[in-house]
Amino acid sequence: MMCIMFRMPRPATSPPPLPPTPQQERGKVKRQALYDASVRAFASSGFEDARVEDIVDAVGVSWGTFWRYFPRKQDVLLVMGVEHWARVKAAADRATTDDGPVRPALRDLFAALLVSDWPSHLHGAMLREIALTPTRYSALLGEDGTPWIQFIAQLLTRGQERGEVRTDVDAGTLAAVVAAGVLFPAIQGGYEDLRSLRGLPGAGDPIAILDRAFPVSWRGVEAQPDGARRRRQVPTPKVATRKPRKASAPTTT
């Protein structure tokens, strides 16, 4: 769904292989050096303007070495996303087991996803790439990694059990709806050079956009009292019926 919202073009050819995980220490050191140099270049020049040529020169390796560890330049952003989620995941784990209300826990999870120590434009580029290539990103998380959407679904499942979240729709669908409603405006309007929603109130501040979008999205998933549900039901329109006219008695002349 997020791919559709971001208008991801359908690839004409098969995607390149995933970035490999080096097994030898020498490869791990080289890959980490390329990653660190890439993040510095993206932070200083912006993702689009950063050149692979400058990155490999800074590390002292060939172009082929860069493409071996990062088959796409965008794969550096996805690895950043894996690193960022690893930092956020501890708090997310606690949120799924705490006894507190689900709504503030879910809002705090989104807030943690939307900010980091990286420059705003770089964090936005990372989130946009994850939204465009969720399958590739999930593959990089590995078998032990749990994607964001599953954590959101787990929170909503707990909310359903506690009567805070509607139960007429499954938690997975509700998770997709609330994530799209929050992340799309935040990613498109909250990060410097990625503002396609330039007129959005709070543009340039992802947390300000979160605090405007989240209450709206939450209304679609929260449980409604029986009285509220009855008031929101659309009454069945009454169909006007006409009584048959009595036949008049024939006249004689």
Image (cartoon, rainbow, N blue to C red):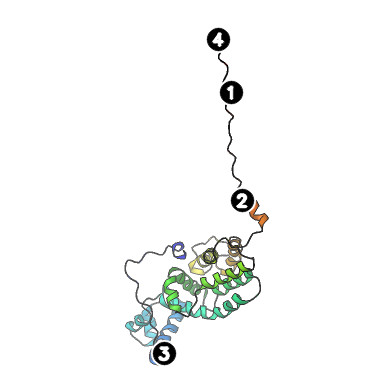
Which corner quadrant holds the C terminus? top right
Provide the residue designation for mark 2: 233
Mark 4 vs mark 1, CA separation in Å = 18 Å
Comes first in the chain, label 4 or label 2: 2
Q: Badge 2: few (under 14), some or many (20 or more) residues near its Cα, within 10 Å?
A: few
Which residue is drawn at the image coordinates 59% and 44% (left, top)? 236
Q: Residue 252 has which mark?
A: 4
The mark nearer the N terminus, 4 or 1, is 1
Determine the residue positioned at 46% across, 62% down: 5
Along the line of sight, the residue nearer the viewer: 44 or 157:
157
Q: Badge 3: how crowded within 10 Å, few (<14), some, or many (20+)? A: few
Provide the residue designation for mark 3. 29
Going by the numbered disc 4, the residue's amino acid type is Thr
x, y percentage for residue 211? 61, 66
User: Which quadrant of the view contains residue 56?
Assistant: bottom left
The reply to whether residue 205 is in sight is no
SS type, badge 3: helix
Disc ID at residue 44: none
Q: Which residue is drawn at 51% across and 67% down?
A: 187
Q: Name the residue under label 1.
A: 246
Mark 2 or 3: in front is 2
